[in-house]
């Protein structure tokens, strides 16, 4: 594994963060989503991974609402520059973002992604708690509880920030 530094984003990182998402995902939609979340002041957690002084990865967490209450965060997007993938950087970003969310007092974090990947961090299928996402993610929609009792049982739909409309 590389030695990398995970730290909060700085203003000077914005172009590099955009470039990370634009390179890692097939389309620039996720890069634009991060810009839109930042513009709406909804980048609750925004961490970069630095290797040799260069930004090579980024993770964003933004508020979600569950049954009208706002007590959770959605992890999206997370990306690592292709040449730096499979070195543990994505895992560090996810773990540090969960620690930052807990520090902020968030009760839970949801994610839409591969079970094999997010399961290793403790995410569980959100459907087990009676939660679903707006995009029909099925078992890819997962949740992790950061504060005991914070996941509402059977609360139904979890809504991401309005900026996510550009992804749908
Ligand atoms: C997902 C991503 C951030 C992981 O970053 P990374 O630095 O490669 O992650 P790590 O090195 O910590 O972990 C790599 C492991 O995750 C696995 N992995 C990565 N993406 C996966 C996926 N979509 N499904 C299942 N496993 C996945 C790799 O196979 C590897 O497994 P191994 O540890 O058994 O070898 C990176 O692959 C990426 O930027 N992908 C493109 C953008 C993307 O799809 N983001 C996630 C959207 S939900």
Image (cartoon, grey):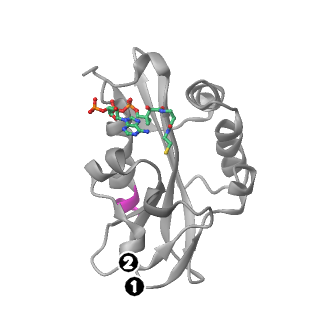
79 left or right, relative to 14: left
Residue 31 position in % (x across, y down): 66, 36
Q: Is mark 2 within 8 Å of ligand 1?
A: no
Q: Which residues make up the magenta segment? A: 101-106
Asked whether residue 43 is in view, the answer is yes
User: Quarter for ligand 1?
Assistant: top left
Percent coordinates x, y for residue 140 in the rendering:
45, 56
What's the distance in space between the residues labelled 2 and 1, CA to CA?
5 Å
Mark positioned earlier in the residue sequence (2 or 1)? 2
Does residue 68 appear to the left or right of 39 in the view shown?
Answer: left
The residue tagged 2 is 129
In the rendered image, which residue does mark 1 sit on? 153
Residue drawn at x 50%, y 34% is 79
User: Disc 2, disc 1: CB below 8 Å?
Assistant: yes
Residue drawn at the location 49% of the way across and 84% of the way down = 155
Q: Quadrant of residue 123?
A: bottom left
């Amino acid at each position: 594994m590389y030695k990398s530094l995970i730290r909060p984003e700085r203003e000077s990182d914005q172009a590099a963060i955009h470039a990370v998402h634009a390179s890692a995902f097939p389309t620039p939609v996720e890069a634009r989503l991060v810009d839109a979340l930042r513009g709406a002041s909804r980048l609750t957690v925004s961490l970069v991974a630095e290797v040799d002084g260069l930004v090579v990865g980024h993770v964003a967490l933004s508020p979600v609402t569950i049954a009208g209450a706002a007590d959770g965060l959605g992890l999206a997007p997370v990306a690592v520059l292709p040449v730096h993938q499979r070195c543990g950087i994505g895992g560090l970003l996810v773990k540090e973002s969960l620690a930052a969310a807990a520090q902020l007092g968030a009760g839970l974090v949801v994610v839409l992604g591969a079970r094999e990947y997010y399961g290793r961090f403790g995410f569980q299928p959100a459907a087990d708690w009676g939660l679903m996402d707006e995009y029909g993610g099925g078992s890819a929609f997962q949740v992790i509880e950061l504060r005991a009792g914070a996941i509402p049982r059977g609360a139904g739909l979890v809504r991401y920030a309005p900026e996510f409309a550009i992804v749908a």
